[in-house]
Amino acid sequence: MARAMLSNIKSGHIRQGASTITQQVVKNFLLSPERTFERKIHELILARRLEQALSKQEILALYLNEIYFGHGRYGVEEAARFYFGKGIADVDLGEAALLAAMPKAPSKASPHKDPERAKGRQVYVLKQMVRHGFAAPREAQEFIDAPLAVVEPDAGPGPADDAQEFVDMAREELVRLYGEERLLRLGATVTTTVDLELQRKVRAGLRHGLAELDQRQGYGHKIKPVSEKRQERALKKTKGAPAVGKIYAGVIRAPAEGIKLPKDAVAIQVGEQMVMLKVPEGSRYDHPEKTHAEQFPIDGITMVKIVAKDDDHGQPEGWMVGEIGSGPEAAVVLAEVESGEVLAMVGGSEYQRASFNRVTQAKRQPGSSFKPFVYGAAIASEKFTPATLVEDSPEIYEKWRPTNFEGDVYRGDIRLRVALTHSINTIAIKLLDTVGIEAVHAFAKAAGIDAELTDNLSLALGVSEIPPYDLLSGYLTLARGGSRIEPTVIRRIDVAGGEPWEPSREAVQGLRDDVVFVLTSMMTSVVAEGTGRRALALKRPVAGKTGTSAEHRDAWFAGFTPRTVAVAWVGFDTPKPLGRAETGGRAALPIWLSAMQAAEGDKPPLSFEPPASVLVRTIDKRTGLLAPEPVIGPDGVVVGPEPDEIMEEYFVAGTEPVDHAEPAAIPAGDAVLDLYGDGGLDSPGSEDGGDAAPAPTPAAPPVDADGDDDFGLPSVTDEP
């Protein structure tokens, strides 16, 4: 310690560090990790006081229960369960020696990352124990000769790496309830709602969906050598030393003579800095049919995210460590409808402890996945029904002229169910303009969306920034028939000597069940016939909605069955276009589908059951009125509407149509004249129209091959 202090004083800054185990306990529990002389002096003073108050054994116990053992494992008990599948009280001498060897360099000495190095460290500890009389030579030799015996990461009964999002949210809740200062001494047991097996499947599905998107758009793939001029331009973009966490353009290089890289690594030059780019076999950016030399050719350019600059990752001296930084990210969250418990939550493709959780922290534009709340407010107003005809036509709102997915292609008068099914922008805006912005705000808030919403007509197109967790809350209320319950990730917190804490599970009927059922029925048409058709692969009743924000910057799918609700989002952390045709139905829906298939499994399908206050009427598809009554033809045969001209529709009681549509085709002859009681009607096709059938609504143009037509959304700068 004295030598380190003299070295630091001579240099004028911190060059060396030194501390006893007691000092490390003080630093971990009471002080910050900053490297300053002032902090070191405080550490020395407090360490003396701690030595006077506690025994060496007690100090060591504190130390071992706090330090890091790699792979997100803190504390010797958790490490023993992770590496050996048993508690620390049950480990043998060889296992104890391996654990004792790891704190110096947990990332390097991990038996899962470098078994040879871990074995060497274990042997060193065992020999030191023999040398100092803590182990018998024969006993130690038995473990020196034996191979390492560790369980696979997923086989241990302890917490899994795949559930770190839940660990972080549990910590946030503990801080909220008990305070940051008390947290380290709390000794709480937290029971979360995560289903670990489901969580792993959901994360695997998210990674698979992103890998497919990467290959479609060429992120981390399709790299080709470029000219020296382009290489120089890429390198000049980096000024100074690259910073950890930032993304840079890098040029692929051949390692210099004498430099040996791991087989899963590639040499990249970023500015003047060399970086070891790690691409593990089977990872998101590893092409299964190409070697690294083929996928990352010399003199090619790719985006690199700097993840480390120390020497704890096996890189050559002076090199930094990076990963592919060009692809988009994703988030998915899934909850049980009945309880509101979150069963799976994946905040990104590579989420580590205290990472950016995109489920709760990424505020992004939901696009058309917000439209159900606009349609819900319209149904709740009782001015509109799923059968109401609204004109799909261009309008100008204070110099803002929104368009549909196909641009200036409009369908004329169409029913609201059809408008939501095909995500028609003009209709959503007209509904909002009619029922009012405040009504939509109120409906969304009652559903559980607490994020701040815009107060202009672009609200209808989902330009408000909402985290996926908020959207899940809103869709959970819809799935529960309007009964609002907060999604929960913690089931129970037990603190020694205190009362156990459990979240409130009180449900509030925030929305009318009849309104929500009618809206849910309309959302099932999105899956059956519209932009969410890929969700049909779930092979059970599904209600949902796609969403694609301006310029394809965000892709969403949110939907539910009577049993499970989930939301999936895909986009870049720094918003930019995902790529051509990367819509909600193409980029996000497959991730959602994978999560829902894992959750629903082979459980029997459930149907959406209407409440007693919802009415069913047979309507005419052209007009939204009641189906035409049968007429008698000249030959005395009763003629009714064709099956494809009518359908059963749901209505909130009191809003159902009362008038019948005119028959699409009127038989000629006296029977018709007698039916209408007027022999002087103009013949069909006359100038006055007479009893001619109304012109049929133009057929809806086909949606794109991906089943999504959410384009034409205004950017934030285009808001009225």
Image (cartoon, grey):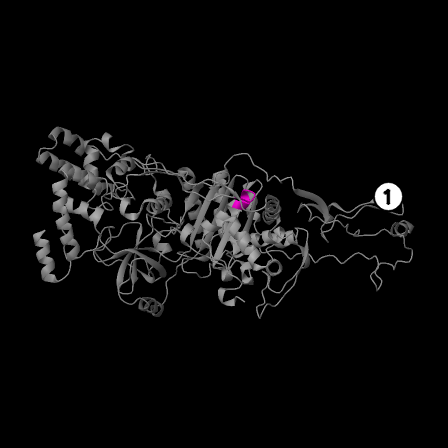
Instruction: Pick the residue in front: 307 or 188.
Output: 188
Label 1, on which residue? 637
SS under mark 1: loop
Instruction: Pick the residue in front: 369 or 119.
Output: 369
> Which image quadrant is residue 104 in?
top left
| Residue at image point 61% right, 57% down | 435
- Percent coordinates x, y for residue 497 in the rendering: 29, 35
The stretch drawn in magenta includes residue 145: no
| Residue at image point 29% right, 67% down | 239
- Percent coordinates x, y for residue 368 in the rendering: 54, 55
Side of 712 where 176 appears, left or right: left
Q: Which residues are magenta?
A: 477-483
> Which image quadrant is residue 151 in?
top left
Q: Is residue 510 above or below residue 233?
A: above
Residue 573 makes an appearance in the image: yes
Side of 684 where 514 appears, left or right: left
Of the residues shown, which amino acid type is indicated by label 1? Val
